[in-house]
Image: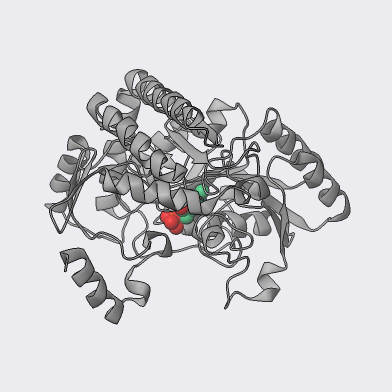
């Protein structure tokens, strides 16, 4: 019996389903990781994988990036948690604000879920309105406000509203189709009690779905006209698409932004920020309550500081290199699938992509859902057999990191070719 299997059987006795986040499970059991470095993962059986899951997008700089590890090691010698403010937090917030000018003030939190929860509470407190609107298939974390027709694991497992979620909460979350600004406008014509519209500017939790031309600027215009706040959930896109996130790439300014993932490049940190007049209603000065023991802890902050500085310093090389590598992989993958007569669509942007087995363009939840998930499962298994680890679901995105070498990308192409043959069978 493999060590992973043995650990999984042991794990199932003490951890529900044997894993600590549902997206980590796949048939018959996941590999258990021993260590990671750069673009590589090694499991407890000595198998090697090139990582294209990359912490669901977090590891833009790859595993154990030198600058980050040394910054954290030096912080560890000075303490891990003070629960009193530090200069590091100020410096990081200044940097975030500089990268994202719409985030005039920033609160540091721990996870993306905490960031979106705070953003929504802030919007309700600021507008004194109750409802929110989200887009079908967008995932904003695992809390009741947003776990309604969500993407990621919820879409994979067919959970529209989670058992245990309060109906009183979920009924105040209205859902409209992604890439359909007309539907948003018509809902807002009737609904006058909407505090905010929250969106993933690039939808990375339904596979990858890109915003159509003008979608983001249209929803900016519609929300401004109707007096609703616009929240960009940039937990995936922040720092990954560009140093200023999707809002910079698409030149659309939200009222509130949430960041996570690449901000800490593998360390637990997230942020919520926006216009000063909105952020200033947070307690203790204001009456919107938000708190956390670990928020702004010096270990995570030192990691994030090193991450942001490294991304900023290398931006002239980093982003074009990732985009080139991604475009090259995607175009070869498309040719391979076409040569094998496999119906497919590939959506890609910057360092992210996903392939869908369908003949229709994937532009929203229903077109993503229409793709053949069984074929994706075969692809995933085929990739894994050939040392390529991608997220084990059609409704996730493949992420490149700056640590991927040309050789890694070549291996990925060979692996995709072999895996596509199994899709064809
Ligand atoms: C766009 C988006 N928002 C929020 C979250 C939640 O972040 P976390 O898992 O850190 O709570 C995720 C996680 O995948 C995400 O992709």
Direction from residue 423 to residue 54 in the image, left or right: left
Please state which of residues 147 and 92 is positioned toward the viewer in this rendering. Answer: 147
| Residue 57 picture location, percent across and down | 39, 43
Residue 295 figure quarter: bottom left
Residue 191 figure quarter: bottom right
Direction from residue 51 to residue 393 in the image, left or right: right
Q: Is residue 297 visible?
A: yes
Please state which of residues 294 and 250 is positioned toward the viewer in this rendering. Answer: 250
The residue drawn where x is 66% and y is 70% is 169
The residue drawn where x is 51% and y is 58% is 141
| Residue 32 picture location, percent across and down | 23, 60
Asked if residue 14 is positioned above or below residue 418 in the image, the reply reads below
The residue drawn where x is 35% and y is 65% is 293
- Total residue callouts: 0
The residue drawn where x is 70% and y is 29% is 214
Question: In the orientation shown, which residue stands out farthest toward the front?
Answer: 425
Scheme of image coloration: one colour
| Residue 289 picture location, percent across and down | 54, 64
Q: Is residue 88 visible?
A: no
Q: Quadrant of the C terminus?
A: top left
Question: In the orientation shown, which residue stands out farthest toward the right?
Answer: 190
Residue 386 figure quarter: top left
| Residue 103 picture location, percent across and down | 52, 39
Please state which of residues 137 and 192 is positioned toward the viewer in this rendering. Answer: 137
């Amino acid at each position: 019996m493999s060590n992973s299997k043995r650990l999984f059987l042991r794990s199932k006795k003490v951890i529900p389903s044997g894993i600590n986040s549902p997206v980590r499970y796949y048939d018959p059991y996941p590999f258990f990781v021993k260590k990671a470095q750069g673009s590589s993962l090694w499991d407890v059986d000595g198998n090697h994988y090139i990582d294209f899951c990359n912490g669901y997008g977090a590891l833009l700089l790859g595993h154990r990036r030198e600058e980050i590890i040394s910054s954290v090691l030096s912080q560890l010698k000075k303490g891990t948690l003070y629960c009193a403010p530090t200069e590091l937090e100020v410096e990081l917030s200044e940097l975030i604000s500089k990268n994202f000018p719409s985030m005039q003030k920033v609160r540091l939190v721990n996870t993306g879920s905490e960031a979106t929860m705070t953003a929504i509470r802030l919007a309700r407190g600021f507008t004194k309105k109750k409802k929110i609107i989200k887009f079908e298939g967008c995932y904003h974390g695992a809390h009741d406000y947003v776990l309604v027709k969500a993407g990621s694991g919820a879409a994979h497992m067919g959970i529209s509203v989670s058992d245990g979620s309060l109906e009183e909460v979920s009924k105040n979350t209205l859902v409209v189709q992604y890439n359909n600004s007309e539907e948003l406008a018509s809902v807002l014509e009737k609904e006058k009690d909407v505090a905010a519209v929250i969106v993933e500017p690039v939808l990375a939790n339904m596979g990858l779905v890109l915003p159509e031309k003008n979608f983001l600027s249209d929803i900016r215009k519609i929300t401004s006209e109707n007096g609703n706040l616009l929240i960009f959930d940039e937990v995936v896109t922040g720092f990954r698409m560009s140093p200023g996130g999707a809002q910079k790439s698409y030149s659309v300014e939200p009222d509130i932004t949430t960041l996570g993932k690449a901000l800490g490049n593998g360390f637990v940190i997230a942020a919520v920020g926006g216009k000063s007049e909105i952020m200033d209603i947070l307690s203790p000065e204001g009456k919107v309550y938000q708190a956390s023991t670990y928020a702004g802890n010096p270990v995570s902050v030192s990691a994030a500081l090193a991450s942001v500085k490294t991304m900023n310093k290398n931006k002239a090389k980093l982003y074009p290199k990732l985009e080139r590598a991604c475009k090259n992989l995607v175009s070869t993958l498309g040719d391979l699938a076409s040569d094998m007569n496999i119906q497919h669509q590939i959506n890609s942007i910057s360092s992210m992509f996903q392939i869908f087995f369908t003949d229709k363009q994937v532009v929203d939840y229903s077109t993503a859902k229409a793709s053949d998930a069984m074929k994706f499962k075969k692809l995933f298994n085929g990739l894994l057999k050939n040392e390529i680890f991608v997220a084990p679901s059609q409704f996730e995105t493949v992420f490149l990191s700056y640590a991927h070498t040309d050789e890694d990308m070549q291996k990925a192409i060979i692996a995709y070719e072999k895996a596509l043959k199994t899709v064809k069978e």
